[in-house]
Image (cartoon, coloured by chain):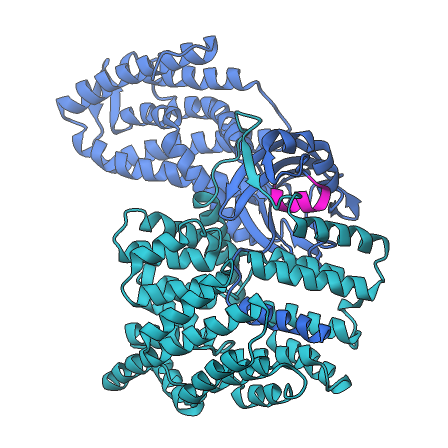
Chain colours: A cyan, B blue
Amino acid sequence: MTRGASAALRLVCLWYLWCGSAAAAPHIPADGNQVVEHLPSRADPVQRELLRLRGVLSRRPGDLGLASALAQRYIEQARADGDPRYLGYAQAALAPWWSQAQPPEQVLVLRATLRQSTHQFPAALADLDQAVQRDSGNVQAWLTRATVQMVTGQLAAARASCMRLYSRAPLLVVQTCLSSVGSISGQAADSYRQLQEAQKRHPLDDPGVQVWVATLLGEMAERAGDAAGAEAHFREALAAGEPDSYLLGAWADFLLDHGRAPEAARLLKDKTRNDALLLRYALALQASGAPDAGRQAEILRARFDAAMLRGDTVHRREQARFELALRKDPAAAVRLAKANWMVQKEPADLRILADSALASGDAQAAQMVRDWLRSSRIEDRRVAASAARLGAAA
Amino acid sequence: MKRIATALLYLAALLLAMPAWAHKPSDSYLTLDVEGRRIDGQWDIALRDLDMAIGLDGDGNGELTWNEVRGRQDAIAAYALARLKLASAGQACPLRLTDMLLDEHSDGAYAVLRLHGACGADVARLDVDYGLLFDIDPQHKGLLQLRHGGQASTAIFAPDSAHQTLGVSGASSWRQFGDYARHGIWHIWIGFDHILFLLSLLLPAVLVYRDRKWQGRTTFRAAAFDVLKIVTAFTLAHSITLTLATLGVVALPSRLVESAIAASVVLAALNNLWPLFHGRRALVAFAFGLIHGFGFASVLRDLGLPKASLLLSLVGFNVGVEVGQIAIVAVFLPLAFLMRNSILYRKGILGAGSCLIALVALAWLAERSLDMKLLA
């Protein structure tokens, strides 16, 4: 059978699987007043504002300022809510310029942000290169560029992008950018210390930035093996306002790693609409031996199947973790982790690669981990422990 | 400084947006069943998406009730159907909504639109033009499953692949042939009336009726020849009527056909108790085989025949029926020949067995002709 045919067959099978398990049978609710879905309420001022802007834009679709403002609002909403539909709405607002080779500068940065969200990293970087070539003072473009380079493992380039922020952005922002790169490229201790200093000496009155800095510090401390320090940073971040899904995920991972699964389960009980948090919730239930663990894992599997049906590959990191820890299928996990590693190279990607390499005995994955540890000089206590066992096994 | 403040928020947004998306992006699930020129469909669209597109939440409180959804049924149908265009051979195949239901998917509640439509002629290639939600969410995807003649294919629609042409009859003819052959075998195995008719005619094949009593045949060859004559006659006859009925040349009411099949089993079984047409059993097999062919044809009609490869499917089904028959004969003949001189065979199997078959078939006859229920 050709690869195409086998892929098509798998899709058909998946479809039946999906139809069979995840979906109940179509029906007509007996009670017409039954609430069948929860939608964003129009009483919410943010939703009202989005609706208003959308209405104005529909009358003036060529208004660049309005379109980019609305796209920006949608991207912020996607982050707050975790719903990628808002990214689609943002793209729709930019429709008149979306396919242009050289769109206006603000469209370039927004388009890059949306492209990276679907893992089109080279296309995103091309947009950002164009933006900084046109205006080397575009802070947004440099920051976004640094981030994309960091995620894709181009650490020297990321550091160079951060450097371009000096004298253009507040010191805390410059340091956060630099420390993010430094902490995963051989300067973990210095990066941590410098960011803590910058947090004290150059604070910014912006809850978003406060949460972000504290979360990063927590992750750095945890990688260095300073559990008490990490917990303090995470608690600081949690206290700064309504925690976003990234912070909840990082905090839950910390709790799971330190044998505090029941706390993680309590934290995430009502957040399971979010796939990444449902993964941690199911892991927490499994670790604490809760009877509901199997059902939650099934729901998660249905969501991965649905994503696969649409041809998405942006969930591989989480899916690898799901296969390894919940499905106990190291072969599937290492396959996903390796495919993910070709695209993303963040600490979480390295960790699942090392864990699944260890569980599956996959020599190629083990070699990928060793190569990266050597070339990036990343310091991560847990990955180092896995790597030592990999080395012993080799 | 204002610009920098925006940038800060932006950076935070970007960094924290990096991990995998919390929810699945927007998808719709479309299933189309194509049969001849008819198209039946089911289209699952997220209520969340429909609300964004045309507004469902009448009171805007964020709690969407079924009444609110039902109240917008016409608007939903108009919106969705304007964004799905099917055509075959350059001619549109208009769709209409027959029913709207609700279903839960892993990521929320969906409206389930049941659709029906027809093309001008039998569909060989289906042009699908999909444009749902692309104007308000370009990351939306339409996931299509197309089913036809027992086969399925899938397609994914996105803004850059909104128009696709899918082959309906282009699927492997041999696979289709195999599918229908399997249906044929299956039908013979579960179609007890055909098996019992054949067995009733075959039971005496290892014997001869001489001097008003049954005697065992001397050679296996003679018995096999008798079986061959009967099976060939039966096959020839039902193939003729199966073909004629499937091609629409002859048609008989199914109640009449089913009753006649039951009657044929009764007669074939009684003949073993009181030989009426001994020596002419092949002729009887042929005559009633004509009736059984109509029965096979109605099964084939229920399966749904792809018009584009009608003949192939017909032959496939018939081959399947023959294979099923041969399997029965292959088990029956050696056993019967070995047992032919025993009391068990003559009194038990031929005598009591035929009696039982006649009784069962009589019950069928009553059920089918009078449209009542006797047997479980």
Q: Quadrant of the C terminus of chain A?
A: bottom left
B280 or B83, which is in the foreground?
B83
In the image, residue A278 sits, relative to residue B272, either above or below, namely: below
- Asked whether residue B48 is drawn in magenta, I would say yes
Whether residue B138 appears in this view of the structure is: no
Q: At 49% from the left edge and 36% from the top edge, which residue is drawn?
A: A25
* Residue A278 position in % (x across, y down): 42, 55
Pick out the residue farthest to the left.
Answer: B343
Viewer can see residue B199 = yes
- Viewer-proximal residue among B326 and A147: A147
Per the rendered image, the range of residues in magenta is: B43-55
Does residue A220 sit above or below A75 in this rendering? below
Q: Is residue B268 above or below residue B66?
A: above
Residue at 37% x, 73% y is A230
Residue B347 quadrant = top left
Work out whether residue B295 or residue B23 is closer to the camera in this orientation and state it. B23
The answer to whether residue A225 is left or right of residue A205 is: left
Main SS of the magenta part reads: helix
Residue B19 or A305: which is nearer the viewer?
B19
In the rendered image, which quarter is residue A383 located in? bottom left
Residue lying at 54% horizontally and 25% vertically, measured from the top left: A31
Give coordinates of residue A357: x percent, y percent.
33, 76
> Does the magenta-highlighted stretch encompass residue B165?
no
Tell me how many marks there are: 0
Please state the horizontal and vertical placement of residue A373, each as a whole percent of the image.
39, 87
